[in-house]
Image (cartoon, rainbow, N blue to C red):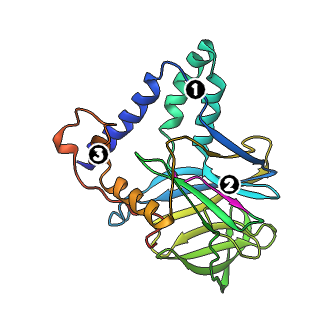
Amino acid sequence: MRHLLFLFLSVFTLVIFAQEEKRILRATKVYDTAHTIVYYDLEYRTDSTKIHKYRRGKTVLQISEKYLAFTDYYIQIVDSLNDYAVGSKEREKLVSEPLSEVVGLVRYKIPLLTNLSRGQTTFQLGMWTQLEYTIPTPQIDWNLMAGDTLVNGVTCKKAMGRYAGRTYVAWYAESVQLPYGPYIFGGLPGLIMCIYDTKRNWIFTNSGIKPATSLAKMYLYTEKEREKMDRKKALSIYRNELENMISVGIAKGRLLNVPPELVQKTSSNMLELEW
């Protein structure tokens, strides 16, 4: 049944993109231009009880002097293709097929932006509701541990810390003097090359570091419909949407003629468990 649910949602997403007759610029605010891009492969379980079933994606950490941005690699491609097509029927036809392919690869859906000087991070999320909240950038109390390993050919040291209901193992590279990592993970004496919670529900593994010759634009979305609220409310709404994605979609008028057998509760297994 869950396979049918996933298939339905995938087809629904692709239909939305395929049926767009005219593309419009997605409302965004550009904050800066990155000088460095760090790539992380993502593995995660949508259901924590299915320990061998992972979904896989690709994420990017963008670094400038003033900001950090973390988002899905493929959503950046989707946005770039969409913006390229705006205002040209020829370009719309040209990107239609690649857009349909790339949108199906998007996995990570919580873009965030950290203002380094202010020490604040803004998160954007939501399935059917566009949500946003800003908090002081979390500071993790890391314990530096004995042990070393290689990640993507780079020697790394070990640390452990806890955040939002999960305990994490981080492998950081002192040879890469960037005290950052995926999501909000940072504050170690070197770039986090790999990080995972101890139950391995969420795993980020470095797959490359390079100057930002592409994907350098650091932005967040600014749609009029986006609702700004506190963290607790935003994450509660998001969890409800994940666990009741079909019924909430129906209630909001976004899904029509859904077979009754697909209206069921699903697992959320969010990156953040406590708020």
Residue at horizontal 70 percent and vertical 72 percent from the top: 172
Q: Is residue 206 above or below residue 146?
A: above
Dividing the picture into quarters, in which one does residue 27 lie? top right
* Tag of residue 69: 2
Crowd band around label 3 with a 10 angstrom C-alpha radius: few (<14), some (14–19), many (20+): many
- Residue 275: image location, x then y, percent: 46, 72
| Residue sitting nearer the eye, 121 or 194 | 121
Residue at horizontal 43 percent and vertical 47 percent from the top: 129
Q: Which residues are magenta?
A: 109-115
Q: Amino acid at mark 3?
A: Ile
Answer with left or right where residue 191 lies relative to residue 235.
right
- Residue 58: image location, x then y, percent: 58, 50
Crowd band around label 2 with a 10 angstrom C-alpha radius: few (<14), some (14–19), many (20+): many
Mark 3 touches mark 1? (CB < 8 Å): no
Q: Amino acid at mark 2?
A: Ala
**Residue corresponding to mark 1:** 24
- Distance from label 3 to label 1 (Cα)? 27 Å
First in residue order: circle 3 vs circle 1 = 1
Mark 2 touches mark 1? (CB < 8 Å): no
| Residue sitting nearer the eye, 185 or 127 | 127
- Distance from label 2 to label 3 (Cα)? 30 Å
Crowd band around label 1 with a 10 angstrom C-alpha radius: few (<14), some (14–19), many (20+): few
- Distance from label 2 to label 1 (Cα)? 24 Å
Mark 2 or 1: in front is: 1
Mark 3 or 1: in front is: 1
